[in-house]
Every structure is written in C-alpha cells, then in structure tokens.
Amino acid sequence: MMSLKKFLISVFFFIIINIISSISCDRSTTLQENTLENLVDEASGTGYDSQAYPSYWSMIDDSNDNLEDLIEQSTDDVLTLKSSDQVAVTTVSVNDFGAKGDGETDDTEAFVKAWKVACSSKNAAVLVVPQKIYWLKPIRFSGPCLSELMVQIVGTLEASDDRSDFRQDGKHWLIFDSVRKLLLDGGGTINGNGKQWWQNSCKINKSKALAFYKCKDLIVKNLKIQDAQQIHVSFQKCMNVLASNLSITAPEKSPNTDGIHVTDTQDILITTSIIATGDDCISIVSGSEKVQIMNVTCGPGHGISIGSLGSGKSEAYVSEVAVDGAKLIGTTNGVRIKTWQGGSGSATNITFENIEMLDVTNPIIIDQYYCDSKKRCKEQKSAVQVKNVLYKNIKGTSASDIAIKFDCSKNFPCQGIVLQDIKLEHEGGKTAKALCNNINFTSIEVVSPICSQAKR
C-alpha cells in the first residue's frame, strides 16, 4: 500500500517537473521584466548584459512557492485512482530472486534479475530493497523500461571492497543507463565502501558510486550516499532531474569524493540536501545548462564549483546556473568558477545568491588560471569566457585574508560581473580583502570587501 502511494506521488512529481520546465522555457523568451535590470541600467557600459540573465529562474522560483500546496492538493486526486482500481502496479522484491541481505553474500545476481523483471513490466513497477544489508559488485541497470519505475531502497547497498571486481567497468559501481520516468527513494543507504579506493586515488576517469546516464524525467530523493569510491552521485547526459533530500558524506581527507557531479545535463534541480565530502560538494561541468541549486548545506569539502572547464585545450560550455540558498561551513572554497588556460567556450548567465559562509577559505572566486598539475602550467592566449555572473546577498566569514578573488584572463577578461549586497569579514577579526584582475564589474548596494581594479 505505502509503496503504491509513494509511487503515485512520484508520478505527479514527474508531471510537475515537465510543467515547470515547459512553462519556464516558453515564458523566458517573452518575459522582459527583471528586477536586476532596473538595478543595473546605469551599468550598461560596463559589459553587463541584463537581457542575458534568464527569466527562466524567476519562473522556477515562482512555481516553487506554490509547489508544496499543489502537490498536497493533487496527491489526493492521484490517490483516488488507486481506490478505484484504475492503476495497476507490479511490485518486485530483490529477496524474491534469492538476495540474502546478510552483508556477506554476493547479492549482485538477484538484483540483476529483479531489475529485468521490473523494467520489463508493462505496468508501473516498484522494485523493493528491504531493510537488510546487500553486498554488491558493479551493476548496470539498463533501460529503456516499458513503464514508470520506482526503486524503493529501504535497506543498505554496500559495495565490494575488492577492486578486482571493478575490472570490467572501473568507472561505475551502480549505474542507471537510459531509463525514463525513474524514481529512487526509500530512506535507505548506498555505501561505496571507498577506503581501498582512496588509498590508490587517481583523478583520471573518476569512479562513481551512483551514476545516471542518459536518464530523463528522473527523481532521486530521501537517500543517504556515503563513502563513495570517488564521485558519490553523477548525472551525465540527463534531462529533467530532481535531486532532493540527500545526505552525502565522506571523510574530509577522502580524495576526489565529489558529492554531486553534473555533466552535459539540462533542467536539473538539486535541493534540500547536506553534502560533506573530501572534494567539491557540487561540481558542474561542460554541457550543463538550466541547473538550479536550492537550500544546500556544504562542508567540509571544496565548495560549489562550476568547472573545471577547458582542460587539454577543450571547448566547454555551461549556462543558466542558479544557486539560491546555500550554507557553506569550513570549505576550502565557497562559490567558484574555475577554467584552464588554452580552453575555449563560455560560462555564462550564472547567479549565486542568498548564501551564508562560515570560515570558508575562498568564499568567492573566479580562477581562469586554474592549474591542477604538479608542473606549472604555461601561460596561453585562449580561455573559456566568463560572462554575466551575479553575486547577491552573500554574507559570512572568510578563513583567509582574500575573501573575493577574481583572477581573470588577460585576453578574455571576465565580463558583466555584478556584486550586490556582499558582506564578508575575516574570521580572525582582520579586514578582508578583494583581489581583482582583468575584470569588468559593477557593485550595487553595500559590497565589502570591494574590488580595486588591478592588472595582471
């Protein structure tokens, strides 16, 4: 009964995501009013392009204000379908296929068999993982499936700690491939058992604990993901995604353990989650657009990052990213854009607002000279263009003297950077500073510390 109710509610979530996305995209081309435009009209000569800031995000915000009430009201209507027996749901348990759930037996084959049955169901299906501990080798849950599918994880999934089990696919432990209308829920735990990986860590081809590839209309919520081999949750080439109420944790010293990694993904909302890892809490890289992050707590970790972009002289594009409501505690960075020299493309139409920093080493940073290499990177002429970035209502404390650092390219200076209502103080009581190179910026209201223009 509860599985059915939760599944039907999830179907409504899919409808809401699609409605919001379609309304937002239609309205964004015609809606001309923007409060930011009125605030920075006088800055039109500074490189700031007010028309480039997407009204898409204000539409999302307006929709979210009434989303809870709408879901609650509509849920009753959806559940009425069940009472009139108009909806058929197939329930599949991994235990029915021989899973022991004793934390020692290899339950991989039982999960593979259960998935095949659920995915091939012509009715909406619920795949249940009961409250036990299931020991698993790498699994690829392949689609497309015949109908909507919910994976209800109540128990714990624990990864094999034998790295030889990952020889066939060293990049993934659990991956959902080409599945549409998928919901992962249940309040359970996904444990990557990553200690062996951390001791032999490599930044090339990072392994993902929970990965989604080419999925559409996807909801991932109410789960604990911990101690990943490297990246905890990855969304690659996905569309229409909601990630909500996630707890993602790993030791502060665990290398390359990004919390949520977004690559080549469009229309994704990450909300109401706590992320504490050894690398970026959230990383957004090339091909991603219409990414919204709301009410996220981050720390320890490396903060919320766009990039790195342009490595190996590659072309990279990220656009329409909005972080609205975040708390960063003791992170090495706050909100960061990082690009390599020699790359090309752009990072544009980005908003960071309503953010609290507590003892953050680099609260606000754009680094177009990012160099994650043991050798010094040579200076190059080309760069990824950073343009139209708004920082608004960001307050708190910096663990370093430099609270704001914009280190932009000589040949491709940062353009259209707007600072509004910024107050960052040094944790030790000193006056915080801003370092700004090759940047075209506008300040609105009180901004402290304030940039003094400098040349590289």
Image (cartoon, rainbow, N blue to C red):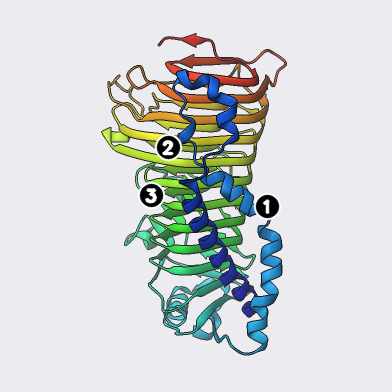
Say above or below: 336 vs 224: above
> Contact, CB < 8 Å: mark 3 with mark 1?
no
| Camera-side residue of 435 and 175 | 435
**Position of residue 132 in the picture relative to residue 110 (left or right):** right
Residue 192 appears in view: no
Q: Where the C terminus falls, by quadrant? A: top left
User: Label 2: which residue?
Assistant: 307
Q: Position of residue 370 (x, y in %)?
A: 40, 27
Q: Which numbered dot is residue 264? A: 3
Q: Out of 28 and 381, give the one closest to the viewer.
A: 28
Pick the residue in front: 166 or 436. 436
Query: 336 left or right of 144?
Result: right
Q: Is the residue 331 above or below the residue 264 in the image?
A: above
Q: In this picture, is 303 found above or below 14?
A: above
Q: Mark 1 highlights which residue?
A: 65
Q: Do the numbered discs 1 and 2 sit on residues whose CB atoms are within 8 Å?
A: no
Three-letter residue code for mark 2: Gly
For image coordinates 68% across by 25% down, the residue present is: 397
Numbered disc 1: secondary structure: helix
How far apart are the alpha carbons under marks 3 and 1? 28 Å
Nearest to N terminus: mark 2 or mark 3: 3
Question: The residue under label 3 is which amino acid type?
Answer: Asp
How many neighbours does mark 1 have within 10 angstroms: few (below 14), some (14-19), or many (20 or more)? few
- Residue at left offset 58%, top offset 29%: 38
Label 1 – label 2 distance at C-alpha: 30 Å
Give the residue at x 43% y 29%.
Answer: 387
Percent position of residue 70, x then y: 67, 63
